[in-house]
Image (spheres, rainbow, N blue to C red):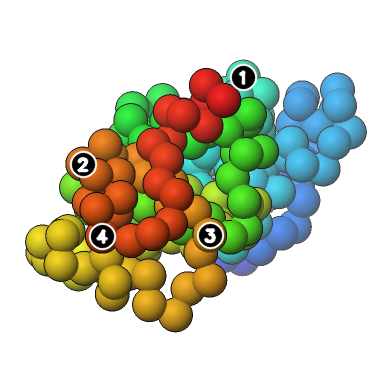
Amino acid sequence: MPAFLARIPAAPRDHAACSGCSLCLLVCPVWRQHRDPRRTPEYLLKALQCGASAEELAGIVEACPLCGACVPVCPERVDLVGLIADLRRSAAAPMSHGAALSRNAALRRKLRATDLYVIEPRAYHADYERLVKYYDQLQVETGCSFNLDLQRIAIPAQGQVAWILRGRQATRVVCESRDDCAVFAAACDLPVVHITELVEA
Ligand code: SF4
Ligand code: SF4
């Protein structure tokens, strides 16, 4: 067997194997048409290596027609078509009601850096791996603080409002759950709004 063939991995590999050689970019029709580095397979893999979520990569993933041209040229045998198909399925999966509402651009503009945004805990824990990245991104974009702690689901909400607010400079509480709205309204002096009120305001 020629030496260069011996260096090619036997089985398809995931995004971690990408070395950034750019060979896939040269054959990608999306790159050839748009010349946009953010819509290339190489960019996609580097973003995944840095922890990007399916939601953040939706633009690149939707632009790819799954032509498969990138797969045979990759010296690292990265399964780009399989990866992109998985990302499509993941992005299409339904999100919790609160997370879906918080994707609304008008609502995001109304969130303030001094808001405490209270995530509905059961939906959050049920889809933790995806939602932790989603809410991290929302935090960066809005500057809000979040109840991103793992104990919350096990503690009665009524008894933990002071604990959640401790050390925060919040001037308003925004809740995904109407039950949490009632708990915060009864236990603190801050204005409390349900997330749908921001969509409608
Ligand atoms: S499968 Fe997608 S990323 Fe790969 S070459 Fe085709 S269009 Fe580009
Ligand atoms: S050809 Fe393979 S190793 Fe090179 S940048 Fe593309 S995916 Fe990464």
- Hey, what amino acid is under mark 1? Pro
Q: Which mark is residue 179?
A: 2
Please, what secondary structure does the residue beneath circle 4 have? Answer: helix
Residue 71 locus on image (x, y percent):
58, 38
Q: Decide which of tag 3 and tag 4 comes sooner along the chain.
A: 3
Q: Is residue 2 visible?
A: no
Pointer 2 with pointer 4, Cβ within 8 A: no
Residue found at the far right of this picture: 35
Q: In the rendered image, which residue does mark 1 sit on?
A: 65
Q: CA distance from mark 1 to mark 4?
A: 52 Å
Q: Earlier in the sequence, mark 1 or mark 2?
A: 1
What amino acid type should be assigned to the residue bearing mark 3?
Thr
Instruction: Tell which circle, 2 or 4, labels the residue nearer the N-terminal end.
Output: 2
Q: Earlier in the sequence, mark 1 or mark 4?
A: 1
Look at the numbered discs 1 and 2 and tell me whether their residues touch, using CB distance below 8 Å: no
Instruction: Give the residue pinned by disc 3.
Output: 171
